[in-house]
Amino acid sequence: MKVLLINGSPHAHGCTFTALSVVADELQKGGMETEIVHVGHKDIRGCIGCYKCKDMDDKQQIKARICLDNTNIPHCGQITRTSDSSTAWTSQYV
């Protein structure tokens, strides 16, 4: 099983990365493959309601697994297609 761990913090090797590293280590001890990807520096936008994904059939949607309009994260899209699971973490500034 491959697990993708997404670091959404603007600090690539900060506290969020440290926590993800602990999670990755534990998953690896359980025999799972892990990859941490840093996206905190990317301009990732939320859904804009273009419905391009809705025009796809179910099999295409499952294969794509990312927004068709968000071209700033092609690397993550490629990885998510080969991962069995994923989790996203980001820092919280109050």
Image (cartoon, rainbow, N blue to C red):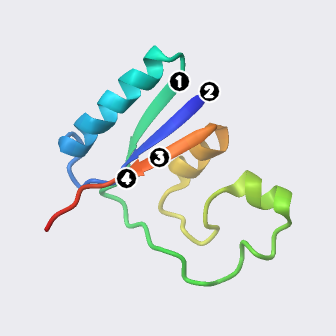
Alpha carbon separation for disc pair 2 and 4: 22 Å
Q: Earlier in the sequence, mark 4 or mark 3?
A: 4
Q: Which residue is mark 1?
A: 33
Instruction: Specify few, some or many for label 3: CA neighbours under 10 Å numbering under 14, 14-19, or 20 or more.
Output: few
Q: Quadrant of the C terminus?
A: bottom left
Q: Which residue is mark 2?
A: 1
Residue 35's x, y, as percent? 46, 32
> Residue flagged by tag 3: what amino acid is it?
Thr
Instruction: Specify few, some or many for label 4: CA neighbours under 10 Å numbering under 14, 14-19, or 20 or more.
Output: many
Alpha carbon separation for disc pair 1 and 3: 14 Å
Does the residue at mark 4 contact the one at mark 3 (Cβ under 8 Å)? no
Q: Earlier in the sequence, mark 4 or mark 1?
A: 1
The label on residue 87 is: 3
Single out the mark in the foreground, 4 or 1: 1
Could you say whether the residue bearing mark 4 is in a helix, strand or loop?
loop
Could you say whether the residue bearing mark 2 is in a helix, strand or loop?
loop
> Residue flagged by tag 2: what amino acid is it?
Met
Q: Which residue is mark 4?
A: 39
With respect to residue 31, does 49 lie above or below? below
Alpha carbon separation for disc pair 4 and 1: 20 Å
Single out the mark in the foreground, 4 or 3: 3
- Viewer-nearest residue: 70 or 7: 7
Q: Earlier in the sequence, mark 1 or mark 3?
A: 1
Could you say whether the residue bearing mark 1 is in a helix, strand or loop?
strand
Q: Earlier in the sequence, mark 2 or mark 4?
A: 2
Does the residue at mark 4 contact the one at mark 1 (Cβ under 8 Å)? no
Could you say whether the residue bearing mark 3 is in a helix, strand or loop?
strand
